[in-house]
Amino acid sequence: VVNSTVDGGFDMRKWGTHGMQLVTPLWLLKYLPNMLPCHVGIIHDIQGPSNTITCAESSALIALSEARQVVLRGDADIALAGGAEAKVNPIVMLRQILLKRSTITSNDDPAGACRPFDANASGSVFGEGAALMVLEERDYAVGHGAKIHAELVGCGESISLNPHYEKLEDDGAGLQIAIEKAIEEAGIEPGELDLVVPHGTGIPDEDAIESMVLERVLGKDVSNVPVWPTKSMLSVTGAASSGLDLIAAVRAITSGIIPKAKNCDKRAEGCNLSIVSEPLKKDVRYALCCSYSYCGHTAAAVVKKYEK
Amino acid sequence: MKQNGKVERVVITGMGIVSPLGHDIETVWQGLMTGKSGADYTSLFDASTFPAKFGAEVKDYDYRKFVNKPELHKHGNRGSLFAVGAAAQACRQAGISIETDSPTDGIDRRRMGVYLGAGEGSTKYDVFFNALVQAWDDEHHRMDWAKWTDVVLGGFEPMHEMEQESAMPTAHVALLAGARGPVRSCLTACAASTQAVGEATMMIRKGDADLMIAGGAHSMIHPLGVTGFIRLTALSTRNDSPQTASRPFTASRDGFVLGEGAAVVILESVTSAKRRGAKILAEIIGYGSSSDAFRVTDMHEEGRGGRQAIEAAIADAGIEVADIDYINTHGTSTAENDAVETKAIKAALGEAAMKIPVSSVKSMMGHLIGAAGGAELITCVLALRENTAPPTANLHDPDPLLDLDYIPNEPRKMPLDIVMNESFGFGGQNNVVIIKRFEE
């Protein structure tokens, strides 16, 4: 870009003759989101269907839902699904600051900055990561002796319809529809959930809406169902985040332990969720993961302890 | 979907398009029938010194003509606004209520979804580039990010930044129609909207939705998008003749012509369409998807992935290869695609390939990238309606190594019942959809 200036300002014509020649030839292929699965596919010679869901934070759960459909309809025996994103770059960080989603008051305490459902929450923290899972049709997995970690038994999706696209709608209807669909597909009652991993960003307005939705869904069981937000530790990792949450839920199922929620020392006013305040030994049979994106997309999934 | 013995047939009940050849279905079809080109010198920014100085832009488009509540979309990126116009057309044709909390079409909004192959918005390039210039610390040869932040904080607008998310077109379309079912956005490069249509079809078959608003929206005609394709040497540089630059299957083809636009179809279960009395335009009978798993830059030389996707779509449709009456190719006008695609078709169809006419409407419309497959699906439906296959324009010097029937230069009247649409994307993404004239 600095090779494309005239009189100290950027000049598009000079970019055309000079600047663009310095752009690495494969730049666009670093930028296209579908390059992630393409690299993975090349490494492992995966020739079946491949898709790249670009629904921000809800992407991983939607990808898992679609991959599950692909496997169940017989178009693949095994699917690799999840999400990956690197949000730690100046442009993306700045975008979150402009949209008032990032905390800007916690620079002296990065580890304590993201405080989902906490009275002192001031916004979210953005990060990077990847979370991938191998999905197989149950009988196929049993047939080749695979170790089964958990069963994906319910998926639900919808969208928040808000003319202010960057915010959840006030009544949380889109999030509630996704959660209810996932629970319904799992064939259980909300009270049968042993764990909820909420989206919980640490953005006070959004946590309040999610909290309200979960209270509506859980009804009287809200006092019994443990809620374990993870973004205080993992941060908002974009497309990876709902995948990381699902893995966290599966580990809670396989270990029988729900870890303590971090940075939620004093519940925000109006939040009646049973946030896990101490590590909890618990036989987790059904866990619900919730997500929504800052474009509005909502997705939820229920995973079940594998029982022969 | 064979689960539980229930297989929902999926049909198209509405279509809408915003493309370099026009902003409505009939104008686009007329353009295709008369061999019109959507290409011209780039006007969206100063590309006069670029190695490729032209593209196929959507001209004179105003999304406000398509909606009653334009303020809901005023921040929309180019792709989002194209999507809003195309979706509004498609919904109107299908009799779907839009922009209302009290729809009268009898469709349960929780059973109505959206699935687009959609691309990112573009940044404010003047601010972006000048911020980089101002924040460059020449003495230490590095970026001064604190200074950069100060500059862009003053120049970037929050909602404009938001609109760079490639999922935004789906958010606009969902809001337009009030859709509360599954809303998905995918970006598998140039194959994205065919994948969106295919997966949306599968969702209806499975029973996850009764109706899906599906297709694609994309605009990469901005300085960095064009630069990216130029650096990949993917674009035609025939700067003396933009209108004849896209010339698929010729010996002189030298790259594709970058286009932009949106194309939306209403996919619906037959049960839902009949219950509402909607007019059925065509049936989606087959979908196949595969990956080359070969190279990020190149297609597999023998068209392995393309062949697999074609075979999967034919198997899904339950038809014989000879049943296919016409193939709408990906046909980009790059040396590689047109040769590999021809190989893939021949490998998948065998001897029948020599008898099946194929063409590329990219010769006229340009390459709509994420929206290409959707726009081409619409041309397939129109081809069925008119019993006329669109031509490959600019095909005057056929590549002697490519030997299919490419329908050169003139549309061809012929009975059409089953038509196949192919889309291939960077990274080895292959998606194929087969449609059929609807019969009870």
Image (tube, coloured by chain):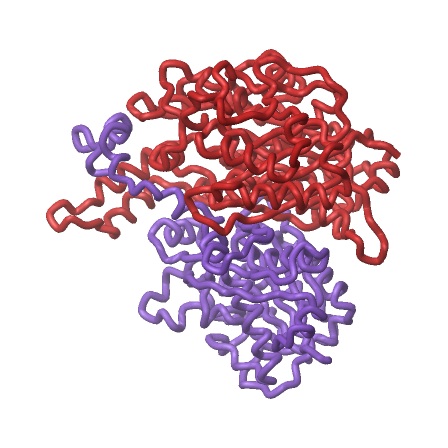
Residue at image position (65%, 31%) is: B353
Which chain does the red colour mark? Answer: B
Judge whether residue A215 can be spotted in this image: no
- Above/below status of A112 relative to B177: below
Which quadrant is home to the N terminus of chain A?
top left
**Closest to the observer, B410 or B119:** B410
Q: Quadrant of residue B392?
A: top right
| Left or right: B190 in relation to A92 | right
| Left or right: B262 in relation to B134 | right
**Closest to the observer, B204 or B424:** B424
For chain A, what colour was chosen?
purple
Judge whether residue A291 can be spotted in this image: yes
Q: Position of residue B60 (x, y in %)?
A: 52, 19
- Above/below status of B228 relative to B245: below
**Closest to the observer, B379 or A255:** B379
Q: Position of residue B70 (x, y in %)?
A: 59, 31
Q: Where is residue B160 in the image (x, y as percent from the top left)?
A: 45, 40
Residue at image position (50%, 51%) is: B293
Which quadrant is home to the C terminus of chain A?
bottom right
Q: Position of residue B414 (x, y in %)?
A: 73, 18
- Above/below status of B36 relative to A181: above
Count of numbered tags = 0
Q: Which residue is the extreme one toward the bottom?
A: A281
- Above/below status of A181 relative to B158: below
| Left or right: B122 in relation to B11 | left
Q: Which residue is the extreme one toward the front?
A: B351
Residue at image position (79%, 46%) is: B108
